[in-house]
Amino acid sequence: MKTFTNFRKVLLMVITTAVLAFTATETTAQTKKSNIMKKKILFVVTSHDKKGDTGEATGYYLGEVSHPWEVLHQAGYEIDFVSPKGGKAPVDGFDLTDAVNKKFWNDTKYRNKVENTMKPSEVNPNDYAAIFYAGGHGAMWDFADNQEIATLAAKIYENNGIVSAVCHGPAGLVNIQLSNGKYLVDGKKINAFTNEEEVAVKLEKVVPFALETKLIERGAKFEKSGLWQQHVTVDQRVVTGQNPQSAHGVGEAVLEELNKLK
C-alpha cells in the first residue's frame, strides 16, 4: 500500500511538472507573438521637394504611402514616419480621386504624422518589426546618402526584421551595409523603378544616378517587368516593388513576411 502511495506521489509530481512546463512554453510563445504584434513599422519619406534644376516640385508619392499603409494598418500595425530632415514631408502625386489616398489623407492621426515626421535621431530601431521606404522622385536626392536612416534599417534587418521599398524608395537601400560589411542588396533579388521607366518620364538626365544601375553595382540581382507593370520581389526579408502600381502588392508582401515571424 505504501509503495502504491509513493507511486501516486511520483506520478502526480511528473504530471504537475509537465503541466507547468507546457504552460510556461505556451506563455513564452504567446509573449513572443504579442511582442511581434506590438512592434511598429517605420515608413521613410523624402524631405526633398525639387526635381534637380528643373524647378518642378516633387516629394513622396502619396499612393506609395497610402496603399501599403492601408494594408498594414488594417492588419493592426502602428506606423510611424521618419524623413531625413524631419518635420513636414513634401507630397507628390496628390490624387484624392484615389479612394485609398483620400482615406489616408483624411485620417487625422496619420495626416498629422506625415506632416510632423520624426528625425532619424529620434527613432529607436528596436521598436520596429519593419522599415518601408516610400518612393517619389525626391527620394533620389536624399535617401541614398543618409547614413542615419541606413543604420536604422540595418539594425531593424539584423533584429530579424523586414526591409522594404517601392519605386524610387530603393534608393534608400543602395548604401545600407550590414555588420559583416556587405551591402544589404548584395546577392539578393531586388526590384525598383527601372532605367526604361526613368527614360519614359524624361528624367534620366535629371536624377543624380540611375537607380537600377546603382543597385546592380551593389550586387543586386535586379528583376523587372515592362513599363508600369506591377512587379514585387521578395528575397531574404527584403521586399521591393517596381513602381506606383506595385505599392499595394509591396504592402501585402511585407505583411506576409511579418506573419512568418509570428
Image (tube, rainbow, N blue to C red):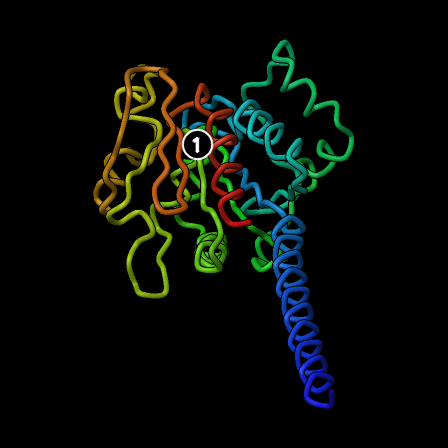
Residue under pointer 1? 166
Where in the figure is residue 217, as x and y percent of width and height? 21, 44
- In this view, the residue farthest toward the bottom is 2
- In this view, the residue farthest toward the top is 97
Where in the figure is residue 94, as x and y percent of width and height? 59, 18
Residue 126: quarter of image: bottom right
Q: Is residue 202 above or below residue 74?
A: above
Q: Camera-side residue: 240 or 197? A: 240
Residue 3: quarter of image: bottom right
The structure residue drawn at horizontal position 69% and vertical position 79%, both measured from the top left corner, is: 13
Q: Camera-side residue: 89 or 151? A: 151
The structure residue drawn at horizontal position 41% and vertical position 32%, both measured from the top left corner, is: 168
Q: Camera-side residue: 225 or 62? A: 225
Q: Residues within 10 Å of mark 1 (few under 14, many from 20)?
A: many
Residue type at tag 1: Val
Where in the figure is residue 255, as x and y percent of width and height? 53, 37
Q: Is residue 248 above or below residue 139?
A: above
The structure residue drawn at horizontal position 60% and vertical position 34%, both measured from the top left corner, is: 72
